[in-house]
Image (tube, grey):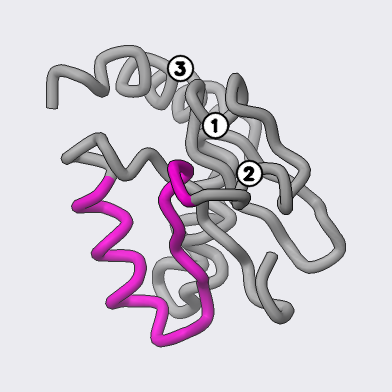
Amino acid sequence: MVDGRVTLVYDAECEFCARLAGWVERSARGRVVVRGNQEAGLIASLGLTREEVDRAAWAVEKGGRKFEGAAAINRVLRELGGGWRVLGSLYLVPPFRWVEDRYYARVARRRAWW
């Protein structure tokens, strides 16, 4: 978390991840801090481990609450507001969450292919 904003931590070496992170940065209008997990000292400062950030994207709120994978992406969508908030809120409904968690895991395993 940086100065009260949600921080999105992503794999900056993954082209697919970097494109999506760029979109978030442009869309967030300063509401979300977007940082690559390779940034020196970042993961330790957020209370994450290399193993965790190698596995998935993370969103970290003020106060240290952490969201992993699909939960992180949806937390960021809710922070963007408007229609994105509605879309990100669907994750809070179990059937949507189950599908999104499975799909996220599948995409994350194939990151190197993008």
Give me the C-alpha separation between circle 2 and circle 1. 8 Å
Query: Which residue in the protein does label 1 denote?
Result: 53
Closer to the observer: label 2 or label 3? 2
What residue occupies the far left of the structure in this picture?
A: 114
Q: Is residue 25 above or below residue 3?
A: above
Task: Give the number of callouts.
Answer: 3
Q: Could you tell me residue 51's position as x and y percent? A: 60, 20
Lower position in the chain sequence, tag 2 or tag 1: 2
Query: Which residue in the protein does label 2 denote?
Result: 43
Mark 1: few/some/many CA within 10 Å (<14, 14-19, 20+): some
Q: Could you tell me residue 26's position as x and y percent? A: 28, 77
Give me the C-alpha separation between circle 3 and circle 1. 18 Å
Q: Residue at x 46, y 23 (%)?
A: 99
Q: Point out the stretch of residues depicted in magenta.
A: 18-39
Secondary element at image label 1: helix
**Left or right, residue 9 beside residue 51:** left
Q: Is residue 76 above or below residue 104?
A: below
Give me the C-alpha separation between circle 2 and circle 3. 25 Å
Disc 2 to disc 1: CB gap under 8 Å: yes
Mark 3: few/some/many CA within 10 Å (<14, 14-19, 20+): few
Query: Which residue in the protein does label 3 denote?
Result: 102
Tell me the quadrant of the picture where the N terminus can be found. Answer: bottom right
Q: Amino acid at mark 2?
A: Ile
Q: Could you tell me residue 29's position as x and y percent? A: 40, 86
| Image quadrant assignment for residue 104 | top left
